[in-house]
Image (cartoon, grey):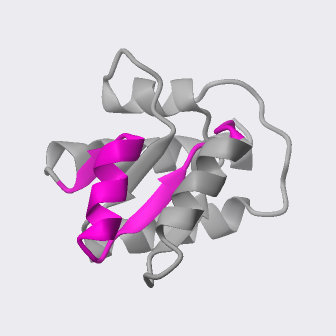
Amino acid sequence: MNNNQDISGRLCGVLGMARRSGRLTTGFDAVSALIAADKEVLVLLAADLSKKTEKELRYAARNSETEILVIPLGKDEISGALGLRKPVGVLAVEDKGFADSVRTLGSRHMGDSKEEGSVC
């Protein structure tokens, strides 16, 4: 397993733990509502999310201090990690510890644009 797959696998694990602890919100509408309510969250976008959806979410967050991070996982990988049937492209982490872990793993992956299959 190469370094990118290891990081992606660990990222899947963190997202799964956040979901099980009730500190993860999924879906464009639910995440937009958190942003509108000025909740302190880290918004995560799937690497294969449409540019239109990303633009709409960034527009919704324009007047807030919400941090938005594109993670190195596709929608299908995210849904697999979370045990969901439908693809998930927009998430919000509502816990500082989980958010810090995601930031750290995401920053380790930056600079590598090659993806090598599902790791979750």
Compared with residue 10, is residue 82 higher up or lower down, i.e. above or below?
Answer: above
Report the number of discs. 0
**Residue at the far left in the pictured view:** 21
**Residue at the far top in the pictured view:** 85
Q: For the N terminus, which image quadrant?
A: top right
Compared with residue 60, is residue 83 higher up or lower down, i.e. above or below?
Answer: above
Compared with residue 41, is residue 71 higher up or lower down, i.e. above or below?
Answer: above
Compared with residue 45, is residue 102 higher up or lower down, i.e. above or below?
Answer: below
User: From the viewer's perspective, is 102 left or right of 114?
Assistant: left
Residue 65 among magenta residues: no
What residue is drawn where x is 62% and y is 25%?
Answer: 118
User: Closest to the observer: 25 or 110?
Assistant: 25
Asked if one can make out residue 120 in the rendered structure from this viewpoint, the answer is no
Q: Residue 109: image x %, image y %? A: 71, 59
Q: Residue 6: image x %, image y %? A: 61, 45
Q: What span is in magenta?
A: 23-50
Residue 32 among magenta residues: yes
Q: Residue 68: image x %, image y %? A: 54, 67
What residue is drawn where x is 43% and y is 67%?
Answer: 101
Asked if one can make out residue 34 in the rendered structure from this viewpoint, the answer is yes
User: Closest to the observer: 82 or 29?
Assistant: 29
What residue is drawn where x is 20% and y is 56%?
Answer: 23
